[in-house]
Image (cartoon, rainbow, N blue to C red):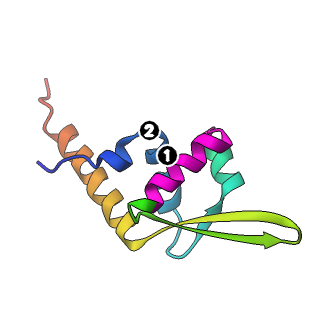
Amino acid sequence: MAELDDIIHQPLRLRIMAALTALPDLHGLDFTRLKKLTGATDGNLGAHIETLAKAGYVAVAKAFVGKKPQTMVTVTGAGRGAFARHVATLREIIAAQPTE
């Protein structure tokens, strides 16, 4: 059985990755939307996005829309693959449970 991905397995990072991988390729979510979806604080969400970015699982693009800063987060190909493997491992664990 494969190992769970420690980077993805943390609950908030799992929520971030689930939200991002549900989108079509090359589509991302802005920081504000991710914050609403996950219920995280600004600092906590920022720290976990940074961890995912350092692992190469997400790409972060910062820009200004008008005079307001906007941070867009997009899952990478490596991130999609890692998330798929993580979910497959969870399914293996579930399938291995004895049924009564």
- Counting every numbered tag in the picture gives 2
Q: How crowded is mark 1: few (under 14 residues within 10 Å), some or many (20 or more)?
A: some
Give amino acid for label 2. Pro
Give coordinates of residue 22: x percent, y percent.
Answer: 50, 60
Towards the viewer: 92 or 82: 82
- Mark 1 = which residue? 15
In the rendered structure, the answer to whether residue 82 lies left or right of residue 99 reads: right
Q: Residue at x 65, y 38 (%)?
A: 41
Q: In this view, does 46 lie above or below 57?
A: above
Residue 92 - label: none
Q: Residue at x 59, y 46 (%)?
A: 45
Which is the main secondary structure of the residues drawn in magenta?
Answer: helix
In the rendered structure, the answer to whether residue 22 lies left or right of residue 33 reads: left
In the rendered structure, the answer to whether residue 67 lies left or right of residue 84 reads: right
Q: Which residue is drawn at 40% across and 66% down?
A: 56
Towards the viewer: 65 or 96: 65
Helix, strand or loop under label 1: helix
- Tags 2 and 1 touching, CB below 8 Å: yes
Region of the chain picked out in magenta, as a range: 38-53
Q: In this view, does 72 lie above or below 18?
A: below
Q: How crowded is mark 2: few (under 14 residues within 10 Å), some or many (20 or more)?
A: few
Residue 42 picture quarter:
top right
Direction right: furthest residue = 67
In the rendered structure, the answer to whether residue 37 lies left or right of residue 55 reads: right
Give coordinates of residue 37: x percent, y percent.
Answer: 63, 46
Residue 11 - label: 2
Q: In which quarter of the image is the C terminus?
A: top left
Helix, strand or loop under label 2: helix
Q: Is residue 50 magenta?
A: yes
